[in-house]
Image: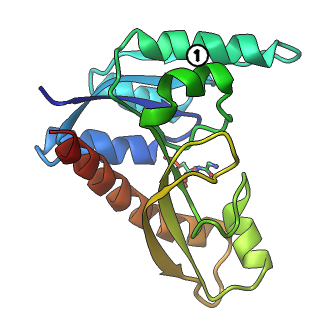
Amino acid sequence: MPLRVVVLISGTGTLLQALLDAQAEGRLDAQVVAVGSDRPDIAGLQRAAAAGVPTFVHPLAKGADRAVWDSELADLVGEYRPELVVSAGFMKLFGAAFLDRFGDCTINTHPALLPAFPGMHAVADALAHGVETTGATVFRVDAGIDSGEILAAEPVPVLPGDDVETLHERIKLVERRLLVDTVNQLSRGRS
Ligand code: GAR
């Protein structure tokens, strides 16, 4: 049986698309069984629907109890019995309830060479610091901010004239490949 993967997204979902493309082309030792988002009306949900993958949306309302939201998210994800959860541009931190259930099998991808430039603005931070090299990292999620065990990482050069958009796009080319490779490695490692 292929590894059951739930992917969580918050935006355009190009990382998700890399997994879906790999799956469609027989390059993924896993099956994306559901895609969840904290935001409705994002392109990533349309990508999932176009691939025939079930979706769910679980927004965090202003002033809502964060722990309740987190626990409900864990329940929604749990309905699909994932063996792996992939945070692919999901812009929310996981809480205790989620990590209790899925902390052992949740990975994330980040547009910098961790532990450098954790957080929401990794590409802008790397540019602001004037580094010549940044990169992409796939890592296990833990209770910290982008602090879990690193599973894969690859440098990406900062080129003269780069802005956040051009640099992020070049990083994402690497992220997509690293993510597919990491899912395959984890899938092969379980048997
Ligand atoms: C990716 O670069 C991912 O690493 C980043 O959001 C982008 C999602 O792109 N995630 C974070 O910065 C999380 N802190 P996508 O929506 O095109 O897949």
Residue at position x 69%, y 59% in the image: 118
Q: Nearer the viewer, residue 133 or 167?
A: 133
Q: How many marks?
A: 1
Residue 136 on image: x %, y %: 50, 66
- Residue under label 1: 73
Residue at position x 57%, y 65% in the image: 168
Left or right, 136 with respect to 126, comes to left
- Whether residue 41 is visible: no
Residue 191 on image: x %, y %: 14, 39
Left or right, 124 with respect to 165, comes to right
Residue at position x 31%, y 26% in the image: 50
Residue 132 on image: x %, y %: 63, 89
Instruction: Look at the numbered disc 1 and say if its residue's Cβ is closer than 8 Å to ligand 1.
Output: no
- The image quarter containing residue 16 is top left
Name the kind of residue labelled 1 in the image.
Leu
Up the image or down, 129 lies above or below 17; here it is below
- The image quarter containing residue 159 is bottom right
Residue 113 on image: x %, y %: 57, 70
Colouring mode (rainbow / by chain / secondary structure / one colour):
rainbow
Residue at position x 31%, y 21% in the image: 53
